């Protein structure tokens, strides 16, 4: 019990004192026998008042202080710091909010605003009496990070982390790094070749001693908590003994392979064998065998001695301080019939169209037909009126406009017609839109009436209500329809289950707060960057991954992590292990252990957020929240319910 | 159904100096245009029809004829797409579409065609003059009849059929149940707009527009009255002092006003005179030359020195013939007829719809 308490009632300029009678509040606070000193102050947070409080604590040997001022969201840490500087434990400081909760909320009734402030201060004093000195919890943190996904986001993050001195394990599910970038070949806004971009990053990664890159690798389990995760990684073999040598025999081996199927890299425009060499822009430059397709016929092993079809998967266990998810996104696959997709042969997605441009030489041929007029339909799978994808995918307008420039440059006779829902080539990307206008591209705009697409004599006919042309129904004869498809979350159930990743309404991974914690997840130590979080273009993805890197470095860079001591604590002698608390805990912070031979629950301090969810479900009242113990809360309730002579005013 | 024709913008470009590709559909032009209403967005609708190449829609459009080129849309355009000049170009385009001979289109798209046809007339007159086929009296005599004949032929075989073609596009194609009565009842609209251009006054409420309107108004009147004076009152061959003075006044006014209009086009201070198509120059310069040469010829007659300076008369007759058989039927002169007729036809269709 603390009985040398100082109380400060702040006026906040006039924010509080205009409605709350601060002198009255001070007078009544001073009546409490444990209150040694009670003052009013113009600005409690000002430098001079802070110094005054420190002086008061030292001179009067105060063992707790109460400051009635604004919300603790604003100044809790300011005043905790004041207490600490005066040699008082910061947890013996109690903040009472009489600004937001009294003067602002009850500006229409100053009398009751004052009364409410009096009662709240009384409760604050009683909480201070029962407050306990606490020390922040320090846990050891591994100075190492796991980056999942070696697209541009993951690669840039790995390099940045490595440069801060963090040991980075970069894993990629595919056998090649670079994600989807290679498929685009040339990147907006400056037409950078994708190959060069990926190659630069890949080469930097390879020579960086702090980065361990595993391709064909997947996370299969995670345990532990922030600072001390234990992760298991499964690594698929490439089925080449030496692994790194490209021998003369590879070409022959690929030729001889009898298994041929549609190449997903080119969206089925070309075929690929079970033994594959990487495409341009993919690294490392090593062959691989796709075991999901390989029949193990053995023909290739006769040609190439280096091939070993019996190679096994490997597993790796690592201690990791923090994890970055950079798994990227997928492009929307329109259902059969949406804008004629899958039904009319001349309807393809933008992603496939980009491959088509690259694969064609002098003339643009698709489906044995020379393409002269192209219609781009925007917002396919984005901003849906009826569907689930209500978000804008951000990159697609610019990608489509950029594509129209590329196709016109390569095939000048092409006519581009854009059917948009408003062109969102924001920022500097607007320049591309201007260029596309200048090359005589035609823009139409539709809203909730989607364009109708039909086919007649090999020509595709589009009917669209153009809101730019007095909502007239306009008809177009088109050779090729390009659906500008959106970005959708990658289907990655396993990873989501292993990491318990929070998923937003749009099915992308969710940050804690879009402005204040934009790259953090609800799971401490797990960060998100790039397209797994939301649709972004490349530079935005890189920016988000780099901000995640700075947060990760701040977290694990010091070797230890400081946690708030206001956590749940379990009295093991009372606990009967009913399992109710583990079910309700949102942070996976309760573990099963043994005490005197009986199973009991225990708090994993690294995971506990002190939310208090477990308290009300405990049937034996074995759980207490430090800093909000029953004694403290009950004393506050008593104070709030106590009689005040002012009630009769 | 309206079919997109991406090649059309290239074709239309030949009719004027606007930049369709610069337009990003902000709609500022339409917001600022005093003609634009909730039902009809001017000039945006025309801009879009032109971008998409909807020729069928353009051919029957009234909007270009409602516009008097105040130029506010072009001043406001953030992309310098020059929508005001687009409307002007559409008037040239429509003129070429009404014209059954196809000669309008050829002249508008091709400055060399203008020059060649003008040169042919000069060569013809020069040839006749050198070969002494006509005496000076005969020149004056036939010149007068030639003027009357040219007017009659141009009206009967070119302008009248073109007006009928215009009527088919703007009335017949739109409203099959038109009434003959409405055609008579709306005649006042036709004549008011033909002689006053009063709609242009409501386009822009500033002093400059009023000055322009007044100049244009007296120019039209003087032109028509000079035509009447020379053709029907035989100005060059009359002794009536009143007619002689009137002729001087009308030709003088034409000369002064056209000089001012030419200066406007040279100074380019106002949006409407910033861009000048060859047809604009030919129109205003030839009108000026006509007024000027007529004035001088009559003066030479009055001082009895025409015989000495007969080349002046030959110059005048050359200008006159160029004007009468090139500019009047195929050039900018036609806006004198097409604009009021467009308003008149539109009035008939609107009334019938009501």
Image (spheres, coloured by chain):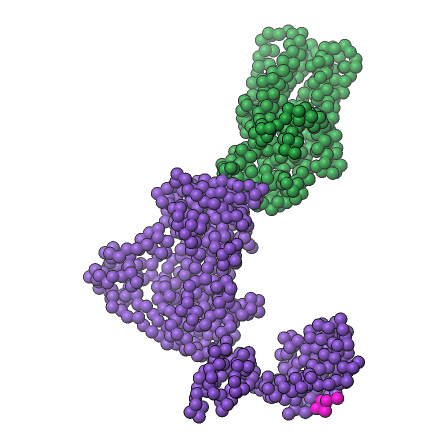
Q: Is residue A190 above or below residue B151?
A: below
In this rendering, position of residue A387 left or right of residue B255? left
Q: Position of residue B238 (x, y in %)?
A: 74, 10
Q: Position of residue B346 (x, y in %)?
A: 64, 31
Part of the protein shown in magenta: A31-35
> Would residue A155 be seen by someone viewing this image from the given angle?
no
Q: Is residue A122 above or below residue A492?
A: below
Q: Is residue A484 above or below residue B116?
A: below
Q: Position of residue A510 (x, y in %)?
A: 51, 67
Q: Is residue A632 magenta?
A: no
Task: State whether the magenta stretch is mostly helix, strand or loop.
Answer: loop
**Point 75% across, 12% down: residue:** B302
- Choose between A70 and B295: the one closer to the eye: A70
* Chain letter, colour purple in render: A
Which quadrant of the figure contains the C terminus of chain B?
A: top right
Q: Position of residue B169 (x, y in %)?
A: 57, 28
**Point 42% across, 63% down: residue:** A491
Q: Is residue B129 above or below residue A18?
A: above
- Choose between A553 and A628: the one closer to the eye: A628
* Chain letter, colour green in render: B
């Amino acid at each position: 019990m603390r009985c040398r308490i100082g109380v400060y009632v702040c006026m906040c300029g006039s924010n509080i004192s205009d409605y709350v009678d601060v002198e009255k509040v001070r007078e009544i606070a001073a009546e409490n026998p444990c209150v040694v000193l009670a003052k009013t102050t113009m600005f409690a947070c000002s430098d001079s008042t802070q110094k005054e409080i420190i002086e008061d604590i030292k001179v009067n040997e105060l063992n707790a202080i109460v400051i009635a001022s604004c919300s603790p969201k604003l100044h809790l840490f300011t005043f905790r710091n004041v207490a600490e500087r005066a040699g008082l434990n910061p947890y013996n400081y109690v903040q009472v909010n009489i600004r937001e909760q009294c003067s602002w909320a009850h500006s229409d009734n100053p009398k009751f605003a004052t009364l409410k402030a009096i009662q709240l201060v009384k409760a604050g004093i009683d909480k201070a009496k029962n407050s306990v000195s606490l020390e922040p919890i320090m846990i050891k943190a591994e100075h190492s990070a796991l980056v999942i996904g070696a697209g541009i986001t993951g690669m840039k993050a790995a390099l940045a982390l490595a440069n801060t001195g963090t040991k980075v394990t970069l894993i990629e599910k595919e056998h090649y790094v670079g994600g989807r970038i290679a498929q685009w070949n040339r990147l907006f806004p400056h037409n950078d070749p994708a190959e060069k971009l990926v190659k630069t990053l890949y080469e930097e990664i390879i020579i960086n001693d702090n980065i361990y890159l595993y391709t064909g690798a997947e996370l299969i389990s995670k345990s532990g908590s922030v600072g001390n995760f234990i992760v298991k990684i499964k690594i698929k073999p490439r089925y080449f003994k030496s692994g790194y040598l490209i021998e003369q025999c590879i070409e022959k081996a690929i030729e001889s392979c009898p298994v041929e199927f549609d190449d997903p890299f080119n969206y089925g425009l070309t075929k690929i064998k079970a033994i594959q060499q990487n495409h341009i822009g993919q690294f490392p430059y090593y062959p691989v065998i796709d075991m999901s397709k390989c029949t193990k016929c053995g023909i290739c092993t006769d040609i190439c001695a280096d091939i070993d079809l019996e190679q096994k998967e490997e597993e790796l266990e690592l201690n990791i301080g923090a994890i970055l998810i950079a798994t990227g996104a997928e492009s929307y696959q329109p259902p059969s019939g949406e804008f004629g997709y899958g039904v009319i042969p001349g309807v393809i997605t933008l992603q496939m169209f980009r491959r088509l441009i690259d694969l064609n030489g002098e003339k643009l041929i698709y489906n044995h037909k020379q393409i002269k007029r192209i219609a781009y339909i925007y917002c396919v799978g984005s901003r849906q009126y009826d569907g689930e994808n209500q978000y804008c995918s951000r990159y697609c307008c610019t990608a489509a406009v950029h594509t129209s420039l590329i196709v016109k440059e390569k095939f000048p006779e092409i006519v581009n017609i854009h059917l948009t829902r408003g062109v969102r080539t924001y920022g500097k990307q607007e320049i591309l839109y201007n260029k596309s206008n200048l090359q005589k591209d035609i823009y139409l705009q539709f809203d909730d009436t989607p364009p109708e697409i039909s086919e007649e004599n090999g020509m595709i006919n589009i009917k669209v209500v153009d809101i730019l042309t007095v909502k007239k129904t306009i008809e177009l004869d088109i050779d090729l329809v390009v659906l500008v498809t959106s970005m959708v979350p990658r289907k990655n159930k396993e990873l989501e289950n292993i990491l318990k990743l929070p998923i937003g309404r749009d099915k992308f991974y969710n940050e804690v707060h879009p402005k204040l914690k934009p790259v953090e997840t609800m799971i401490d130590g797990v960060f998100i960057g790039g397209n797994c979080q939301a649709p972004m273009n490349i530079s935005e993805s890189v920016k988000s991954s780099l901000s995640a890197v700075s947060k990760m470095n701040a977290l694990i860079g010091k070797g230890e992590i400081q946690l708030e001591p206001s956590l749940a604590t379990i009295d093991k002698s009372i606990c009967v292990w009913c399992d109710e608390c583990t079910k309700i805990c949102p942070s996976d912070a309760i573990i099963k252990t043994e005490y005197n031979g009986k199973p009991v629950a225990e708090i994993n301090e690294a995971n506990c957020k002190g939310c208090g969810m477990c308290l009300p479900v405990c049937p034996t009242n074995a759980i207490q929240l430090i800093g909000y113990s029953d004694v403290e809360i009950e004393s506050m309730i008593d104070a709030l319910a106590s009689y005040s002579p002012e009630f009769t005013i | 159904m309206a079919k997109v024709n991406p090649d059309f913008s290239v074709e239309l470009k030949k009719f004027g100096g606007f930049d369709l590709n610069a337009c990003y559909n902000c709609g500022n032009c339409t917001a600022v245009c005093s003609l634009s209403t909730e039902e009809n967005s001017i000039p945006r609708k025309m801009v879009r029809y032109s971008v998409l190449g909807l020729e069928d829609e353009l051919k029957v459009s009234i909007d270009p004829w409602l516009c008097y080129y105040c130029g506010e849309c072009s001043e406001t355009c953030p992309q310098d797409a020059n929508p005001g000049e687009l409307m002007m170009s559409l008037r040239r385009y429509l003129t070429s579409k009404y014209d059954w001979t196809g000669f309008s289109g050829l002249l508008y798209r091709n400055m060399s065609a203008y020059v060649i046809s003008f040169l042919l007339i000069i060569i013809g007159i020069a040839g006749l003059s050198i070969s002494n086929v006509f005496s000076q009296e005969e020149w004056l005599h036939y010149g007068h009849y030639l003027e009357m004949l040219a007017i009659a032929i141009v009206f009967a075989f070119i302008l009248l059929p073109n007006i009928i073609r215009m009527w088919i596009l703007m009335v017949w194609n739109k409203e099959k149940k038109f009434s003959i009565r409405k055609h008579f009842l709306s005649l006042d609209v036709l004549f008011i707009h033909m002689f006053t251009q009063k709609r242009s006054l409501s386009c822009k409420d500033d002093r400059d527009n009023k000055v322009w309107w007044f100049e244009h108004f007296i120019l039209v009147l003087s032109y028509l009255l000079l035509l009447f004076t020379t053709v029907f009152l035989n100005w060059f061959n009359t002794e009536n002092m009143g007619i002689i003075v009137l002729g001087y006044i009308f030709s003088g006014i034409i000369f002064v006003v056209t000089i001012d209009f030419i200066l406007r086009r040279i100074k380019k201070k106002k949006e409407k005179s910033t861009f000048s198509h060859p047809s604009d120059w030919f129109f205003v310069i030839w009108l000026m030359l006509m007024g000027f040469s007529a004035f001088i010829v009559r003066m030479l007659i009055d001082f009895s020195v025409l015989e000495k300076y007969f080349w002046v008369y030959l110059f005048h007759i050359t200008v006159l013939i160029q004007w009468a058989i090139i500019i009047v039927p195929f050039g900018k002169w036609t806006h004198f007829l097409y604009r009021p007729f467009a308003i008149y036809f539109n009035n008939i269709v609107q009334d019938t719809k009501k």
